[in-house]
Image (cartoon, rainbow, N blue to C red):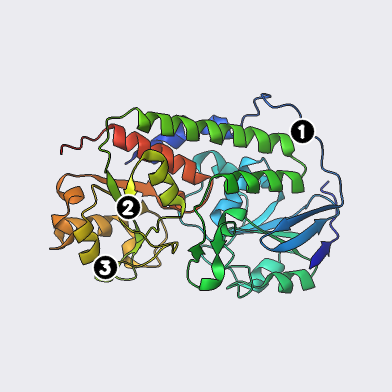
Amino acid sequence: MLVTFRLTAPGRFPFWRLVRRSLPVLLTLTATNAAAAPTTYPLTLGNCGREIRFDAAPAHTITIGQSATETLYALGLGNRVAGTSVWFTPVLPQFRAINDRVPRLADNDPSFEAVVNKHPDLVTVQYEWHVGPTGSVGTRQQFADLGIATYILPADCDTKDNATGGDGTRVAAFSTQSIYKGIRQLATIFDVQDAGEDLITDLKGRETRAIERAHGLDLPKDLSAVFWFSSTDLAAAPFVAGRLGAPGYMMDKLGIRNVVESDEEWPTVGWETIARADPDLIVIAQMDRRRYPADDIRKKLDFLHNDPVASQMTAVREGHIVPMDAHAMSATLRTIFGLDSLSDALAGMSFDR
């Protein structure tokens, strides 16, 4: 199905230390890339199983998902963002000023009405379960019926089946190529290709350096880990990272074995099972969201150190617990910062076998 939209032209841990250290880079156009050709409208492109068309660069967009918001900010498009929603962590420090001027429709899911009442010509979406066939905010067709285009970041649909429910199932391993694809497509939609290529160049460089740093370490060949995002209740089985999502990508690139072999994005696995696997490293999500008790990193740490089963794991006894920005654990541009922070953390650890 081809959907046409007629738009008007627009008149304590290493992650944050690493982000601060590199703040100017995301916003600096280095002129290392040759100038890209401008967008020719009308523009038609495929997006998560649907063809979308733009007659001009969008003037006003609503973002549903923090990664969608930060990607547009990183492309220098903050003035086109008319409202944001779905936040896990504070906005990246270099975007605080622009973000303070943009209305926040909701910390979590906004209502369909709240989005359309802002009269956007584009809704930019991080997760298909927010805007998809059974979207919690609305379906793509509902927005299309009102003349509003929808764009879903490819990282959430390329190599992924979201029809399985929950957070979806990966049908192939996540790759940062899907992040770069989303940046490049958004840059084309908004006709800011040079900004897109500069951002991709910076992120690729950071990715390469993080991998090279880890490969230069004397890490055990069978180093293992588990990534704990959250839990509905601290006594319940936690949401941990499957092998094919963003954390799986980090582990694969740094030579770490994931003790969880599921293809689900965030399966629940009991602590007894995790303890039997006895990972060398536990990476725990740090976030501002408070939907579940274990969203609070202090409660995660208290559980790990005091639960009779979890406290006996090697990673807990050796102090090999790594806090990581929660949004880096999702398939977002922050995944590359997460890779960087994990590589940096490994450099400060010893694994005596």
| Residue at mark 2 to residue at mark 1: CA–CA distance | 40 Å
Q: Classify mark 1: helix, strand or loop.
A: loop
Find residue 259 and report its image quarter: bottom left
- Disc 2 marks a residue whose amino acid type is Ile
x, y percent for residue 135: 60, 72
- Residue at 64% x, 46% y is 181
Q: Classify mark 3: helix, strand or loop.
A: loop
x, y percent for residue 197: 67, 35
Mark whose residue sits in front, 3 or 2: 3
Q: Is residue 148 visible?
A: yes
Q: Which mark is residue 284?
A: 2
Q: Which of the two residues, 195 or 349, is positioned nearer the viewer here?
A: 349
Q: Can residue 303 be seen in this view?
A: no
Find residue 136 and report its image quarter: bottom right
Question: What number of labels is visible?
Answer: 3
x, y percent for residue 170: 50, 60
Mark whose residue sits in front, 2 or 1: 1
| Residue at mark 3 to residue at mark 2: CA–CA distance | 16 Å
Q: Which of the two residues, 8 or 258, is positioned nearer the viewer here?
A: 258
- Residue at 60% x, 32% y is 201
Q: Name the residue under label 3.
A: 270
Side of 86 relative to 139 (left or right): left
Side of 255 relative to 298 (left or right): right
Among numbered discs 3 and 1, the one appearing first in the sequence: 1
Q: Name the residue under label 1.
A: 36
